[in-house]
Image (spheres, helix red, strand yellow):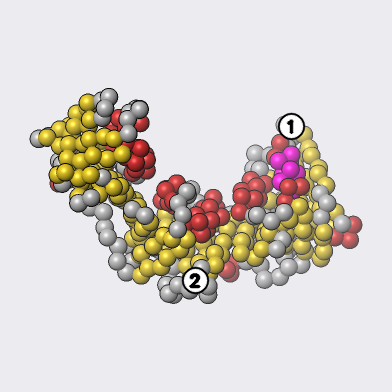
Amino acid sequence: MKLECSVEKIKKALSQVNRITGKNLTLPILSSVLIIASKKLFKLRATNLSLGIEIEIPANIEKEGISVIKGDLLNNIFLNIYNDIKVSIEVIKDNLYIKTKNNKIFIKNYPNEDFPTIPIISGESFTIKSTDLIEGIKSVYYSASLSDIKPEISSIYIYPEENNLVFVATDSFRLAEKKIKTKKTEDFTGVIIPFKNTVEILKLFNETEGEIKVCFNKNQISFSHNGIYLTSKLIDGIFPDYKQIIPKNKNTEAITLKQDLLNALKLSNIFADKFNQINLNINPKKNIFELTSKNIDVGENKTKIEANTKGDDININFNHKYLLDCFQSIYQDSVSLQFDQENKPIIIRGARDNSFTYLIMPMNK
């Protein structure tokens, strides 16, 4: 292997692929990065067996070849190369030589035969704008369960519905659903992506523009965009039939300014008990919309909020943290809180936006 490439492009690619390297004591090769010089491209590849990534960057390839280097080591080297624009990389026997105007470094190679392959996914596919993919994931991923006991809910479920791509996550205490309008995609049964992997998808594509090609089969999914290829395993399971728990009736509704509710929740948090419990009291006849929180070690707080209310009186307890989480997914100035009965979930939406639905289960009084 012998090539010349931009230092900054290697730095950026290494920071992305090194996050995927696995810290696996039984398979130490997973902590390494595979680098490939092929034709006019320099490729960096990493995997932790659940996720795999390959990034291509242009380079002047003098001699093709493959090398395997410890990911943290290689990343730290390039993070500390300053005032150099170009870098020369060459493999001689069992060493990788890195040369810049101001640096001469050599490091030991690992055998590349032990490095796992990254699959090329074939099967069903569709394209989606990178901004839409990121918005869909960001709108719901915080609602996924953090426990791996039930992997089908420690995940994000994505499926097509008419001209929408629907993103859903739940931890069984709350649920978030976001519908993203897309050009018509072929019907498919839906994919379930592990929560931990969706976090890496967000980091990798958060600042990209253009369309991402998504391919998937029963076990894996891939995302391709502008020289970046990411694969993830899929959960082999059935996502809960969540639409059954969304209340069909709306006996009470309150519409209020998002910022007013956010401020009230932050104040109530100071007095919330160890279960993060807050009481919400709505009396439409008296136009009352009131939050109460009480902690025997701190004190008690009641906050009235201006709101348009209608329907039946309702008095309900909920976890304030769950409601706070959803504000990042609501872009309207006003929010709508809808209720069926005191033992049924709360539904929160933007006052003029039905693309996002958030559900919170009530707490026992």
Quadrant position of the N terminus in the picture? top left
What residue is shown with label 1? 298
Q: Position of residue 208 (x, y in %)?
A: 45, 51
Residue beneath the point at 22% across and 30% down: 99
Question: Mark number for residue 183?
Answer: 2
Closer to the camera in the image, 267 or 138:
138
Question: From what the image shows, is residue 295 above or below residue 218?
Answer: above
Residue 181 colored magenta?
no
Closer to the camera in the image, 200 or 131:
131
Q: CA distance from mark 1 to mark 2?
A: 53 Å
Question: From what the image shows, is residue 34 above or below residue 181?
Answer: above
Q: Amino acid at mark 1?
A: Val
Q: Which picture quadrant has residue 111?
A: top left
Q: Earlier in the sequence, mark 1 or mark 2?
A: 2
- Secondary structure under tag 1 reads loop
Taking 88 as reference, is 172 left or right? Answer: right
In terms of secondary structure, what is the magenta stretch mainly? helix
Q: Amino acid at mark 2?
A: Lys
Residue beneath the point at 26% across and 30% down: 100
Q: Nearer the viewer, mark 1 or mark 2?
A: 2
